[in-house]
């Protein structure tokens, strides 16, 4: 059992929507691509108390709390956001940090990954799946 997990995830560019009204059967289908930089890097470890540090610590801490409650995890954690994608720059920072925290928590506790389910729980990917797809498949 690991005591620490580090997750690195790429930014993404959203290039546009394919079908806003759902005529093709896929509402908000979109085009985009992942980038190798900038990236979000989070490290989650077992701890005697829950401490969240680094850039975007408020948002990351909220995600950690929501996930622990949902998954029934009662242990304490140290979460360090070592690097984050700039917020409100159109690079997917919100989705990437949410999924990085979710994946780190699931990996640390030997739980199966559920990218789609965690995205829904954390209210990510409601209009575009580019951030989720780039999280699953990586950068260029």
Image: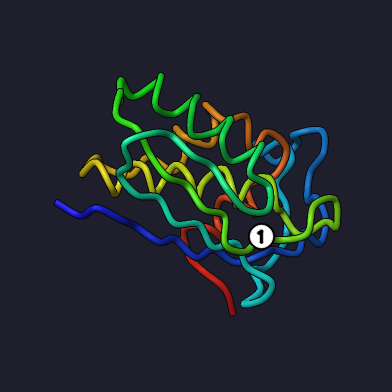
Q: How is the image coloured?
A: rainbow
Q: Residue at position x 67%, y 68% from top?
A: 33
Outermost residue toward the front? 48
Front in this rendered view, residue 33 or 105: 105
Residue 110: image quadrant is top left
Q: Is residue 44 left or right of residue 72?
A: right
Q: Is residue 17 left or right of residue 114?
A: right
Q: Establish if 140 lies above or below 80.
A: below
Q: Position of residue 6 (x, y in %)?
A: 40, 61
Q: Position of residue 93 (x, y in %)?
A: 70, 53
The 10 Å Cα crowd at callout 1, few under 14, some 14 to 19, many 20 or more, is: many
Front in this rendered view, residue 55 or 122: 55
Residue 37: image quadrant is bottom right
Q: Establish if 28 lies above or below 133.
A: above
Front in this rendered view, residue 34 or 85: 85
The residue carrying mark 1 is: 84
Q: Residue at position x 42%, y 45% from top?
A: 78
Q: Is residue 119 left or right of residue 75?
A: right
Q: Position of residue 88 (x, y in %)?
A: 85, 50
Q: What element does badge 1 sit on?
A: loop
Q: How many marks?
A: 1
Q: Quadrant of the C terminus?
A: bottom right
Q: Residue at position x 75%, y 64% from top?
A: 13
Q: Residue at position x 40%, y 48% from top?
A: 103
Q: Position of residue 11 (x, y in %)?
A: 67, 64
Q: Establish if 48 lies above or below 55.
A: above
Q: Establish if 123 lies above or below 32.
A: above
């Amino acid at each position: 059992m690991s005591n620490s997990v580090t997750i690195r995830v790429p930014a993404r560019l959203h290039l546009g929507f394919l079908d806003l009204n759902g005529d093709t059967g896929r509402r908000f289908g979109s085009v985009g691509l992942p980038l190798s930089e900038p990236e979000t890097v989070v490290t989650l470890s077992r701890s005697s108390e829950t401490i969240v540090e680094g850039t975007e610590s408020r948002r990351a801490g909220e995600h950690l709390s929501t996930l622990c409650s949902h998954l029934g995890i009662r242990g304490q954690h140290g979460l360090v956001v070592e690097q984050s994608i700039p917020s409100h720059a159109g690079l997917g920072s919100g989705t990437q940090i949410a999924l990085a925290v979710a994946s780190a928590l699931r990996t640390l506790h030997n739980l199966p990954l559920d990218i789609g389910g965690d995205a829904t729980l954390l209210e990510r990917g409601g209009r575009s799946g580019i951030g989720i797809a780039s999280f699953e498949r990586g950068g260029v």
